[in-house]
Amino acid sequence: GINVDPSLNVPDPTDLKRISYIDQRKRPQVKWMVRTICRLVGVDVDVDHDETNVKPNTESDAPSSAKRIHLIDIGGGRGDLAMAVAACLAQFAAITSHVTVLDVNESSLRAAADRAASAGLTNMSF
């Protein structure tokens, strides 16, 4: 899967306070939200313990009928949650998904768009 770990999105990787925040709060929040959103749309995923890679548990975890999903992340900043959800949902052929990130901070949105493009996530807009 696509590695969407929030630590890859830190503007200054030497900022130990920010890295600590990601390890203790942000990463667990993103993992919980990805699991919760995926359950809500009817898919089961495995979010591994060390990183924020997401993948279907089994082929049978795919939805039984086609679904169209559009999620909006309001105040999404640099897109940590949105990218994790977009990467997860993109793995299911029966799901057509799009994730839109809204934020007042234009530089955060530009950084998120650049990161999504480099990760090959085409189901996102900013």
Image (spheres, rainbow, N blue to C red):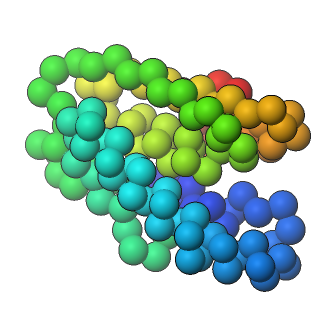
Q: Is residue 25 left or right of residue 43?
A: right
Q: Is residue 93 above or below residue 81?
A: above
Q: Is residue 124 left or right of residue 108?
A: left
**Residue at 54%, 27% in the rendered image:** 72
Q: Is residue 117 left or right of residue 89?
A: right
Whole-percent x and y of residue 92? 31, 34
Tell me if I can see residue 53 in this picture. no
Q: Is residue 87 left or right of residue 57?
A: right
Whole-percent x and y of residue 117? 69, 37
**Residue at 47%, 67% in the rendered image:** 28
Whole-percent x and y of residue 19? 71, 76
**Residue at 49%, 56% in the rendered image:** 30
**Residue at 80%, 32% in the rendered image:** 104
The picture quadrant where one finds residue 46 is bottom left
Whole-percent x and y of residue 45? 28, 52
Image quarter where the C terminus lies is: top right
Q: Is residue 126 above or below residue 105?
A: above
